[in-house]
Image: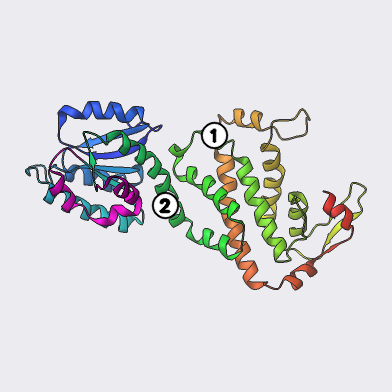
Amino acid sequence: MRNYDLIQVLWVEDDGSIINQYKKDAYYANLELVSYPCWDDAREALENEYDRWSAIILDAKCKHHRDSSDSAVVFLREALKDISVLAEKKQSVIPWYVLTGGDTTEVSDSINDERLRWDSDWTRSSNKKYYSKNTDTGMLYDRIRTHARYSYCLQIHKLYRNVFEAIEECKIDDAAYNALEDLLIPVHFPNAIEAKDYNDKYQKARDVLEYIFRSMSTFGILPNWGKQVNLTASSLLLDNMDFKNKDDSPIVTSRARILPKELSRIMKVMVNIIPPFCHSDSGIEDNVRKKEYINSVDNSTFLLKSFTLQFCDLILWYRNYLREHPDKEENAKNWEVMDEKQLKRR
């Protein structure tokens, strides 16, 4: 049975005498090695559960077919060809590594340069294209963990290419780019982080919102809030509502609806929940209480993940709006500051 807490590694290895010990060592490195004795079996597992695997380890001297003899040249040629074809078909690259205790010259000559995309620094430091069973196994496990994270990023960028392109086009700060990346990875790769740790990332969500609003300020869609962006006021103005003092006097008035009603409703929910969830629960009864809520839903991460996906729609909408309304001075006509002193104070 699959262990969902471990990084999943597809391993082609036909030496039954070492399999159990290698699996045990990998377990302590937070990896689960799932072994197959020939490439036919491994390819079937790869095709059937492509998204399961974070890495592939190839023992060089394995069989191509179930009834083949061991041949590093034939095995690696066919395996690496199939891996490349599947990566293109799935639009997702799984890092692969050659682990061997055999003829290193023959092995090196059979390894193509595709691996340099993720493993070039290993070749520079060791002058090897492969990992030795005698000396490099621990290093390989460490690198698989590191590259698994990198692989997640590559796949997230493919899945959300239009969103990340929109972030750049709208000149949203890199801090938002990185924060959204961190929030999206566990949506598709739950094993990348424990639920408790993911639920501690509401500050990342706040960062995304804040930098979207800062970008809007640079294009005149929102006022310049100064050092600290007012999330509540920003959401009100985008929804064609005035931002007011406690005495109901206006600080900034809105002259037009900017956000569609659907996004406005979502925005209000996020603005009401995300900031309080960034901090420890207060004793004020009316405040949203993160700990109480998280406990009531069995520590699920679905709320933050739902906000993360809604950010994607917001960013895509923002890019399209900005394309139609690129003039900063014209955009600034949709609001008016009535109390400059109060604007910067909040």
In terms of image quadrants, where is residue 131?
A: top left
Identify residue for label 1.
197
Quarter occupied by the N terminus: top left
Front in this rendered view, residue 71 or 54: 71
Identify residue for label 2.
155
**Number of callouts in the render?**
2
Q: Residue at x 35, y 50 (%)?
A: 118
Label 2 CA crowd tier, 10 Å (few <14, some 14–19, many 20+):
some
Q: Main secondary structure of the magenta part?
A: helix
Front in this rendered view, residue 292 or 335: 335
> Would residue 155 appear left or right of 203 to someone viewing this image?
left
Could you tell me which secondary element the residue under label 2 belongs to? helix
Point out residue 3 in the picture as x, y percentages from the top left corner.
Answer: 36, 31
Residue type at mark 1: give it.
Asp
CA–CA distance between discs 1 and 2?
Answer: 21 Å
Magenta highlight range:
100-128
- Residue 237 in the magenta stretch? The answer is no
